[in-house]
Amino acid sequence: MAKQQTYIMLKPDTIRRRLIGQIITRIEQKGYQIVQARQMTLNKEIIAEHYSHLTDKPFFPKLEEYMLSGPVFGMIVEGDEVIQGMRTMMGPTDFTKALPGTIRGDFANSTTYNLIHGSDSEETAREEIGRFFG
Ligand code: UDP
Ligand code: MG
């Protein structure tokens, strides 16, 4: 098992809905370590960079508006195989496929407003940690 770090970002609806505590509790219960955390407000430039794989999608304007709608809470989370482990805890992007017990399965009723971001590979984790905590 390889120790990894991943970038987790609680999106604006998580903060608005007062769900930061419940999500952090799940990360702690799992035994992962939060090694850095900070609340921040994003701008268009950093959103376009972070979601560069999606800027030409029809839903991008809605995603951008969402990510600008309030502060986010970014974290570096560490643990064995934490990148895939957090993706499993989050549940899939499509909220209708996110099973109960996952964060999106329990709290999200929209594919856009889905509470949480987690890096999807070692390469994106490195990039995203540099982008938000560099
Ligand atoms: N998204 C959306 N509609 C879609 C797909 C994605 O609004 O059909 C939003 C959603 O907030 C998602 C984000 O774009 O979390 C990034 O998409 P990605 O495919 O990277 O999903 P994730 O890695 O967050 O599961
Ligand atoms: Mg993604």
Image (cartoon, rainbow, N blue to C red):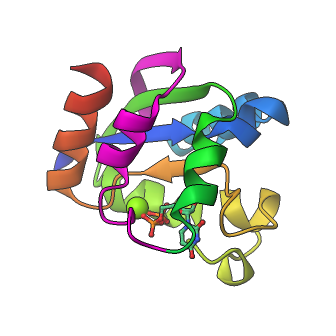
**Left or right, residue 48 beside residue 29:** left
Q: Quadrant of residue 122?
A: bottom left
- Tell me the residue at 73%/82% (across/down): 96
- Residue positioned 35% across, 62% down in the render: 84
Region of the chain picked out in magenta, as a range: 33-57
Residue 121: say if magenta: no
Using the image, determine if residue 46 lies above or below residue 122: above
Q: Is residue 1 visible?
A: no
Question: Which image quadrant for residue 28?
Answer: top right
* Quadrant that contains the C terminus: top left
Q: Residue at x 14, y 53 (%)?
A: 123
Where in the figure is residue 15, as x and y percent of width and height?
Answer: 74, 30
Residue at the image position 30 percent from the left and 57 percent from the top: 52
Q: Nearer the viewer, residue 16 or 66?
A: 66
The mark tally for this picture is 0
Q: Is residue 36 magenta?
A: yes
Q: Could you tell me residue 117's position as x and y percent? A: 50, 50
Along the viewing direction, whichever of 75 and 22 lies nearer the viewer: 75
> Residue 14 at x, y = what percent?
73, 39
Q: Is residue 103 left or right of residue 74?
A: right
The image quadrant where one finds the N terminus is bottom left
Would you say residue 111 is visible in this rendering? yes
Residue farthest to the bottom, as pictured: 97
